[in-house]
Amino acid sequence: MAEQKEKILFVLTSHNKLGDTGKETGYHLSEVSHPWKVLHDAGYEINFVSPKGGHAPVTAFDLDDEINKEFWHNEKYRNRVENTKKPSEIKPSDYKAIFFAGGHGTVWDFPENKELQKIAATIYESGGIVSSICHGAAALVNLKLSDGSYLVDGKDVNSFTDSEEKEQGLEDVVPFLVESKLRERGAKFHQAANSEAKVVVDGRLITGQNPASATPLGQTLKRELKEVEVV
């Protein structure tokens, strides 16, 4: 019998409308494919969940990026992002880590999703890793542990910055600014210049700033997962 692979849960947005701009959004392809590449090559099994389950809308669809192309043409994983699991189908004890992928859609459907928050808190309190990149950190702004405290309170974190949001001209489109909201929750925010890679580690909380941070975040997750013992 083949040895069972250790599992990581990737969370994708189900939301595809960029506010009232008339534009579409979704999860950011390279923020999924680049961490996937590092972790898949390291032997991890990756499952996908979204707030609604089923098809996850995608944005930043660039198949000139070789890793995006490899991911998109991997039949097994393409099928998984087209048929994501619902939160109710997830057993947290199966996973060593949960990773919230970015894309603007996340700021609409991650923050209030109690089921995803419960999954993440359970993984964290069982000794696993909680991770996010870019707008995926929207999942952390209301994430509380069993003692009622915010996971990010007092911790070093990172996300898509207010400056980057303003640079894109979307500060009045999104329902809130992720950096500002994390600071409100007591997080100690660390950032690089706009569009520069940045990954912040605070114990078993690992956060990345933007698409440029996707591969470094995958590499950091790979390194830190070796130290994790899930109870």
Image: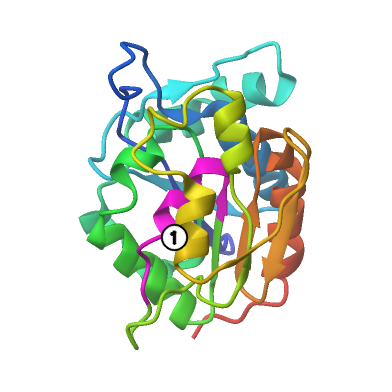
Question: Residue at (62%, 30%) from the top-left corner?
Answer: 30
Provide residue 123's location: percent of width, then percent of height: 44, 72
Q: Is residue 53 placed above or below 24 in the rendered structure? A: below
Q: In which quarter of the image is the N terminus?
A: bottom right
Percent x, y of residue 17: 30, 22
In the drawing, does residue 122 fall left or right of residue 62?
A: left
Residue nearer the viewer, 61 or 38: 61
Q: Which amino acid does label 1 sit on?
A: Leu
Q: Is residue 137 magenta?
A: yes
Is 126 a magenta residue? Answer: no
Rendering coords of residue 221 (x, y %): 68, 59
Can the viewer see residue 1?
Answer: no
Query: Is the residue 135 above or below the residue 202 in the image?
Result: above
Q: Position of residue 16 (x, y in %)?
A: 32, 24
**Near-viewer residue (190 or 17):** 190
Q: Which of 85 and 180 is in front in this view?
A: 180
Residue at 46% x, 64% y is: 184
Read off the residue under disc 1. 140
Give the residue drawn at x 71%, y 77%.
227
Front position in the image: 111 or 97: 111
Q: Is residue 200 left or right of residue 51?
A: right
Residue 149 occupies quadrant: bottom left
- Dot 1, crowdedness within 10 Å: few (<14), some or many (≥20)? many
Q: Which region of the structure is painted magenta?
A: 132-144
Q: Residue at 72%, 71% (x, y): give it.
A: 226
